[in-house]
Image: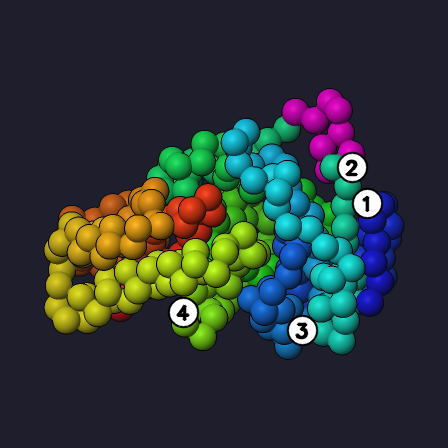
Amino acid sequence: MQVVKPLFEARALRQKLSGTVGFVPTMGYLHEGHLALVKQARIENSAVIVSIYVNPTQFGPREDFGAYPRDLNRDLELLKGGGVDIVFVPSDDEMYPPEFSSWVDVEKVTERLEGAARPGHFRGVATVVAKLFNIVQPSRAYFGQKDAQQVMVIKRMVADLNMGIEIVVVPTLRESDGLAMSSRNIYLSPKERQAAMILFKALTLARQLRRGGEKDAEEIRRQMTALIQKEPLAQIDYVSIADAEALEELSSIDRPAVASLAVRIGKTRLIDNMPLE
């Protein structure tokens, strides 16, 4: 496993790789969810590249960029033995030099949910992922289902810009009590960690209602909201029952749908989602 920071070295090492290349872009502070992406990439490709970069442009002015957990040595230890060929750790200076002024804006799918709650977030995501794709030139790139809207944005960008990269979505990895694995879970106190289970409970309720024959999306949203509001530490950003492709809110579930939510537990903002079969 080679760890490289300068962009020109990353490109030079990439050119030496033959066969298909699987790419796992991360913001570091890795957990088992990230390692599941790496494992899938290792199975399906001749070589694997992982990037570790906390991208400043996807954080808003009052968000947690400065506090976001970082521990490169820990991350590299976790990646050892996982079949990773290259770990790319770029710097802000190379990713966003002083005169940087080019951005990737994906429209429509970014206008809802996380896009509405965090203006500019997906412009930062799409831009940094496009840059990483340009540097790494992967055959396939791997993302977790937990960030469902992000996956849709990246798929749209790849299709629209004819990038020719296969986007592979890996199911959300959860703790034993259902909480989706996330680097931000470290922020939670023991009491908040217990309260955070309400996200999974609300999503499970949505799935149970749908499997029971409920088609009224507003009724499902209402019951999810009522359940979350019973948790004193939880503050809802949004609760959504939307079209699984366009993420447009539904009134009646007459097509594949996804339940998603963003909830603050104390000061920590958590997101999660679950397809409604």
Cα distance between the residues tagged 2 and 4: 39 Å
Cα–Cα span, label 3 and label 2: 28 Å
Image quarter of residue 199: bottom left
Residue 108 in view here: no
**Mark identifier at residue 94:** 2
Query: Residue flagged by tag 4: what amino acid is it?
Result: Gly
C-alpha separation, residue under disc 3 versus residue under disc 1: 23 Å
Tell me where residue 11 appears, x and y as whole percent.
81, 50
Determine whether, in the image, residue 188 is placed left or right of residue 37.
left
Please identify the quadrant where the C terminus is shown.
bottom left
Question: Residue 130, position in %: x, y?
Answer: 62, 43
Majority secondary structure of the magenta segment?
A: loop
Three-letter amino acid code of the residue under disc 2: Glu
Report how far apart the C-alphas of labels 3 and 4 lie in the structure. Answer: 26 Å
Q: Which residues are magenta?
A: 93-101
Looking at the image, is mark 1 or mark 4 earlier in the sequence?
A: 1
* Residue 178, label in figure: 4
Residue positioned 45% across, 75% down in the render: 176
Residue 243, above or below 109: below
Q: Amino acid at mark 1?
A: Leu
**In the rendered image, which residue does mark 3 sit on?**
42
- Quick one: label 3 or label 2, which is nearer the N terminus? 3
* Residue 200 placement (x, y as % from top left): 35, 63
Residue 7 coordinates in the image, percent (x, y)? 81, 45
Q: Which residue is mark 1?
A: 7
Q: Is residue 231 left or right of residue 68?
A: left
